[in-house]
Amino acid sequence: MEKIITSFSNKYAISRNEIITEIESVFSSLLSQFYRMEVVVFFREDLRLEAIGYGRAGGMIIQTPIDISGIKNFPALKKAWRCIWPKPQY
C-alpha cells in the first residue's frame, strides 16, 4: 500500500495525507452502498484498511467489523462503484 500511496502522491502532486483521506472516503462510500449501512473505512498503523459498519438495532447503535478481503460479490461491488463514480461523458 505504501508504494500505491507514494505513486499517487508523485503522480498527482498532492500530500500523502490527502491521498489516504481520499482512499478512506472512496472505500467508505463504496462499502456503504454495497452493504446498505453506514461504513467507515480507515487505515491502521500498518497501512492496512479496516472497515466498520454502523447500524441500529433496538434503538442502539451496533458496530460490525467488515472483512474487506472476504467480499465475494464483485459484480455488486462494481455496481456500487458506478453509483459513486459514473463513467465520464465525452
Image (cartoon, rainbow, N blue to C red):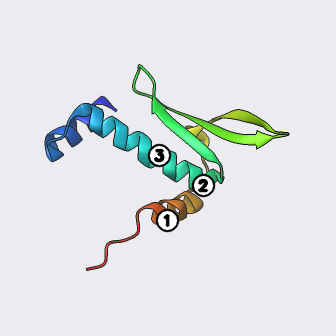
Residue at left offset 61%, top offset 50%: 72
Separation of marks 1 and 2 at Cα, in angstroms: 10 Å
Separation of marks 3 and 1 at Cα, in angstroms: 13 Å
Q: Is 82 placed above or below 59 here?
A: below
Label 3 secondary element: helix
Q: Is residue 21 left or right of residue 28?
A: left
Give me the disc on residue 34: 2
Q: Position of residue 8 (x, y in %)?
A: 22, 42
At label 1, which amino acid type do we have? Cys
32 or 50: nearer the viewer: 32
Dots 3 and 1: beta carbons under 8 Å? no
Label 1 secondary element: helix
Write down the quadrant of residue 66 in the picture. top right
72 or 56: nearer the viewer: 56
Separation of marks 2 and 3 at Cα, in angstroms: 10 Å
At label 3, which amino acid type do we have? Phe
Q: Position of residue 34 (x, y in %)?
A: 60, 55
Q: Is residue 90 left or right of residue 74?
A: left
Q: Residue beneath label 3, please?
A: 27
Write down the quadrant of residue 9 in the picture. top left
At label 2, which amino acid type do we have? Phe
- Would you call the spot at circle 2 few (<14 residues within 10 Å), some (14-19), or many (20 or more)? some
The quadrant of the image that shows the N terminus is: top left
Give me the disc on residue 83: 1
Q: Give the mark nearer the N terminus: 2 vs 3.
A: 3
